[in-house]
Image (cartoon, rainbow, N blue to C red):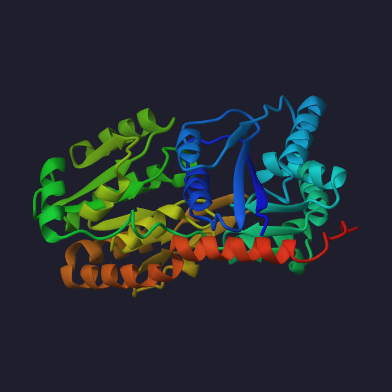
Amino acid sequence: MAKFRVLRLITWLPPGGIEHKIAAVLPAMNRDLFEPHVCCIRERGPLADALEEAGVPVHVIPFRSRWDLRAHNRLRDLVVDLKADLVHSHMYRSNVPATVLKLRLPNLRVVGHYHNVDTWETRRQARLDAWMARRRDMNVAVSNAVRENVIHRLSLPPALIRTLHNGVDLERFHTVSAVERHAIRTQMGWTAGTRIILMAARLVPQKNHAFVLKQLPEIFRDAPRARCIFAGAGPELENLETLAGSLGIADRVTFLGRRDDIPRLLSAADIFMLPSLKEGFSNAILEAMACGLPVVASDVGGAREIIERGLNGYVIDVERESETVSVNAGQFIRHMKRLLTDDDFRLRLGAGAFARVRAFGLDSMVSDIENLYLDLLSRPSAPTQP
């Protein structure tokens, strides 16, 4: 039986959430059925080598602009040379050339992937996005919340978009023995009685680190042995360090920078938090739950699709006014205090998180993607919608 050739189209392959997911999913696909490829439309990025080592070819066709005719022609030639059956693009910048391919090669199946609740588009961009979405064979959203946002924002027929939740690699992210946990904490300088609050996220305004810092003095008053650890790099580092100093908590807050050992840190922490202003379906939440941590996260994107209040964590209310989102500080402080001061409750929620995330394993995500591809490839290419 001939294999179906699938080309994933993405801007580039930095060590980000979407890109890590691609690097995990493609090598795990059934190679008796599929031959996966990746094409970057800017540059390769650090994860390209790992993909190629796993047997997934990475192609690069730099686009100088959305309408770079030479690049569009090179991309079409690549698809023709590969005899690709399906192109799966990620985010707006890659969705444009993928949709152009559909117009030029009508028998090609094209899938567009939406990863976030987007509000950044201008009216002109939104109109183009809506026009393109109708011309693809299918669109995919990482959560029901993102799907509903796309349907509403683009007036997209519901039949043209499906939810395909992110999955977590349960072999990479998992709980560890008490002995190993103690060893990690010792190496990190975390004493046995210290309660570690961990947040692993890029240091950008969207992730809302400043909000966390402003609530910590009140949280620390009731939890004198708690410490807050931020893992991640980004342009906000200097501002956040200054804010921590002005709040008088610099000695209890640590900025680790970019880390390659996030599974190790998660397995040794006590609580995970992510009070973001915008998310699609957070990989970080899945990873923390897989390591047995209760999660306190803002009610954005698909957080409530995995976190069950009081069973495996808490979803904090947010207030929305026009384009502004604010997280309920009182709720955040209250839930953080209880998790830090009630050990039995914290451990019970952590066990609940570990059990809940079993339904969101990487294997399930790979299976869902393969079934989507097989469904689209088993029927005639969809005509473009008006």
Please tell me which residue is depicted at 32% across the width and 50% down the height of the picture.
215
The spot of residue 89 in percent (x, y) is: 67, 46
Q: Is residue 39 above or below residue 352?
A: above
Image quadrant where residue 4 sits: bottom right
Image quadrant where residue 347 sits: bottom left
The spot of residue 15 in percent (x, y) is: 45, 38
Image position of 328 (left or right of 86): left
Which of the pair 367/196 is nearer the observer? 367
Marks counted in the figure total 0
Image position of 168 (left or right of 339): right
Q: Quadrant of the N terminus?
A: bottom right
Image position of 259 (left or right of 300): left
Please tell me which residue is depicted at 18% across the width and 58% down the height of the picture.
222
Image position of 62 (left or right of 345): right
Residue 89 in view here: no
Which of the pair 110/339 is nearer the observer? 110
The spot of residue 136 in percent (x, y) is: 78, 54
Q: Is residue 156 above or below residue 116?
A: below
